[in-house]
Image (spheres, grey):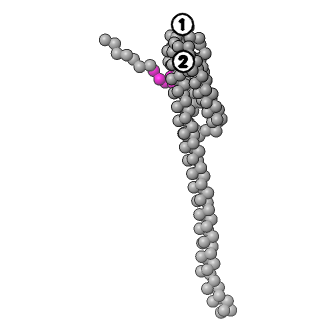
Amino acid sequence: MISRSIAARLMMPLAVSMAMLCALAGIMVYAQVTVARANQAAIDGQTQVNQLGELRSVSRALQRDALNLITETDAEAREGIVKKFDSRMGTFKSTLESFGGQVDKAVIPAGYFASQDEVAKQLEAVSARPMAAIRRARSATFTGRSAPPSAKPPRLPTN
């Protein structure tokens, strides 16, 4: 009986330390999985932000092309602008479609994609109109409908 109690007394600290080691290993695995998920979420968010930056860049180029179409009078130059415009519009639409509803609502504001679809429609309307005497109508369509709804045109000072 005495020998059992001495063995139990010697083994008890070892058993407790092994149990604590197992508990710490479990906590570490849980923490590692949690950190890996957080890292992946950060990478996904950064990827979306980068894609939005590219989308904005293409949108600006399309707006510049639309303005060039409004002002350009040379037929050859207009042809080149139309080719660039069509190529960029394809890139713009495919980038919009690539998001496909899988967006982080914290990164992308509500209504963003609807507004971008409207911008694409208005830009296409500008490029589809003939060159003739509609230049003023094109300019009004572009400036009036491509700005965000909350934006107001600047007021010029009157003297």
**Closer to us: 63 or 115:** 63
SS at mark 2 in the image: helix
Q: Residue at x 61, y 67 (%)?
A: 25
Name the disc covering residue 77, or none.
Answer: 2
Q: In the rendered image of this protein, does residue 46 appear above or below residue 79?
A: below
Using the rendered view, name the quadrant where residue 153 is placed: top left
Q: Which residue is mark 1?
A: 133
Residue 104: image quadrant is top right
Residue 73 at least partly seen? yes
Q: Position of residue 32 (x, y in %)?
A: 59, 59
The label nearer to you, 1 versus 2, is 2
Labels 1 and 2: the sequence-earlier one: 2
Q: Residue at x 56, y 47 (%)?
A: 42
Front-lying residue, 61 or 49: 61
Residue farthest along the left direction in this orientation:
159
Residue 147 lies, in percent from the top left, at 50, 22
User: Which element type, helix, strand or loop, lies under badge 1?
Assistant: loop
Q: Residues within 10 Å of mark 1 (few under 14, many from 20)?
A: few
To which quarter of the image does residue 83 belong?
Answer: top right
Measured in 3D between alpha carbons, the distance from the residue under mark 1 to the one under mark 2, in whole angstroms, is 18 Å
Nearer to me, 93 or 113: 93
Highlighted range, magenta: 147-152
The quarter of the image holding the C terminus is top left
Q: Disc 2 residue type?
A: Ala
Q: The residue under label 1 is which amino acid type? A: Ala
How far across and down, in percent of the image, does residue 65 sit?
Answer: 53, 22
Q: In this orientation, does residue 149 appear? A: no
Q: Is residue 96 magenta?
A: no
